[in-house]
Every structure is written in C-alpha cells, then in structure tokens.
Amino acid sequence: MKTLRAQTIAELKLTLTRGESILLSLGIPVVALIVFSKFHVLNTGTSAPVAFLTPGIIALAIMSSALVNLSIATGFERYYGILKRLGTTPLGRARLVSAKVLSLVVLEIIQTLVLILVAHTMGWHPHHIVSKTGASSIGLSQISQVVLAVIVATVGFAGFGMFIAGNMSAFLILGFSNLLWFVLMMMSGIFFPLTKLPHLLMHIVELLPSTALGEILHSNLGGSITTYSDALEPWTVMIVWALAGLFLASRFFRWEQT
C-alpha cells in the first residue's frame, strides 16, 4: 500500500509539472468557460451560457485527462523504456497501472472543483431540470449519477488512452490524441446543443462517449434537456465504450516499444 501511495503521488506530481498537461486539463477548459460564458459568441440556446457550458466543459476536462494526458504520458514512458523498468521493480505492473488511475482520479477531482468554483463566481448553480418552467435543487440521486458517470467515462477514456499508448509511437500518439480530442470536443454538444446539428449527424454524434457523458452531466446538473431517444440511452453508450476500452487496453497494450 505504501508503494502504491508513493507511486500515485509521483504520477500526480509528474502530471502537474508538465505544461501541456496543465494546459489541456485546466488551462483550456477554464479559459473556454470564462470566454464563451462572458462574450456570448456561441449560440447555446440560453440567456445564461454558463449554465449550458459548465457541465459540458467538466466533461471536456475529464476527457482531456483520461484520454489525452494519459495516452501521451504513457506513450512517452513506453518509448523511453520507463514502463519496462518500472514493471520489473517490486512495484509491479498491476500497481503501476493502479497508481496511474488513482492519480487520474485525483486530477479529475481538482479539475472539477476548479471549474465549479470558476462557474460559481459567474453565477452558475447546479440544479436538476424538472420542467420547462422550474428546477429543483440538486439532490443525492443527481450527485450519485454524476459521480457514477464520471467513473464509467474515466474507465472508458483511460482504456482507449492506454490502447493508443501501447500501439503507437510516442510522437504519433502526440498528434493523434490531440486530433481525437479536438474532434470529440467539437462534435459532442459541449459548446452548442446537439439539436443544432443535421438530423443524421446528430444521431451519429450521440454514439460518442464524450456526448453521452456531457448529456448525463447536463441532465443532472442543469443546462439542457436530453436529446437521446428512448432506445439510445446515454448510459448504454457510456457502458459499451467503457467495456470496449477495458477490453482493448487489457488485450492489446504492449509494455515495450517494438
């Protein structure tokens, strides 16, 4: 346990000392939240853009950490042989992966708290939409769904992040992960409602894990009404992607650069 705790702290410190990690995890989400909330440059369909943007940008921050930061950091550790050496120490491979996941959870907690604090200073208060005319204060059920959604999404994004890190060269990962992050960011209803997309494209985008996470956060924290059909629950999408990510990571991750 002491070894795991020490490695978790080391992983977290490494993440917080990498400039690109801070930029993706906190810099871009915070700046996007402030700029797009204050200057009304996006058509969010609401008079208070911060109410729509906050849940989606929390989803963006989680995706940034669990997918992009993890894949890039792990890919370079694999490229330089660090993973191979750490895997043969008493720490072991299982505890090394566990330490990465735990440090990821701590980072996501920091991200969420910072974003909630920034949004709160701009007048945002989490609430659960109950009708078109009113809203209730967020309760235990909504908090539980938000926490569970973040956990499931983290598992899925981290699984795909490890899969990418274990099957590409480090410098290819750098470009591919950032491109994937940009596509998911722009096509997941984070900055504008999905209903503004063409009908066919909207149903394709609903299959993305980032869309599902954003939709669950929106419906439980306030900001939008769900666009999913009864047959396509966001929870179904999230769970399928999480299982797929776990399978790909466990089956195809390679610890050494070939």
Image (cartoon, rainbow, N blue to C red):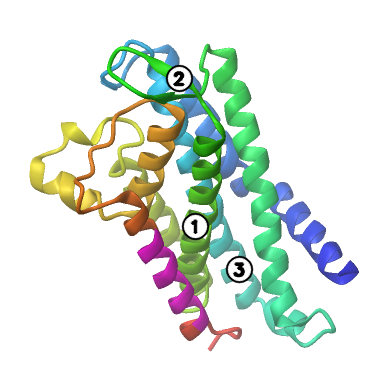
Return the residue at label 1: 152
The correct choice, above or below, for 48 with respect to 62 in the image is above
Q: CA distance from mark 3 to mark 1?
A: 20 Å
| Residue at 86%, 70% in the rendered image | 1
- For residue 166, which numbered disc appears in the image? none
Residue 243 vertical placement versus 208 (above, below): below
Q: Position of residue 201 (x, y in %)?
A: 14, 47
Question: Residue, x 87% and y 71% (percent of image)?
Answer: 3
Residue 136 tag number: 2
Residue 61, percent from left and from top: 52, 42
Distance between the Cα atoms at labels 3 and 2? 42 Å
Secondary structure under tag 1 reads helix
- From which residue to which does the magenta span run? 239-250
**Relative side of 108 to 232, left or right:** right
Q: Amino acid at mark 2?
A: Ser
Residue carrying label 3? 74
Which residue is at the far right?
Answer: 2
Kindly identify the amino acid type of the residue bearing the numbered disc 3.
Thr
Amino acid type of the residue that numbered disc 1 sits on in the rendered structure? Val
Q: Is residue 98 above or below residue 182?
A: below
Residue at left 32%, top 57%? 237
Marks 3,2: beta carbons within 8 A: no
Q: Nearer the viewer, mark 3 or mark 1?
A: 1
Q: Nearer the viewer, mark 1 or mark 2?
A: 2
Outermost residue, left side:
199
Residue 121 visible to an observer of this rendering: yes
SS under mark 2: strand
As drawn, is 73 to the left or to the right of 152?
right
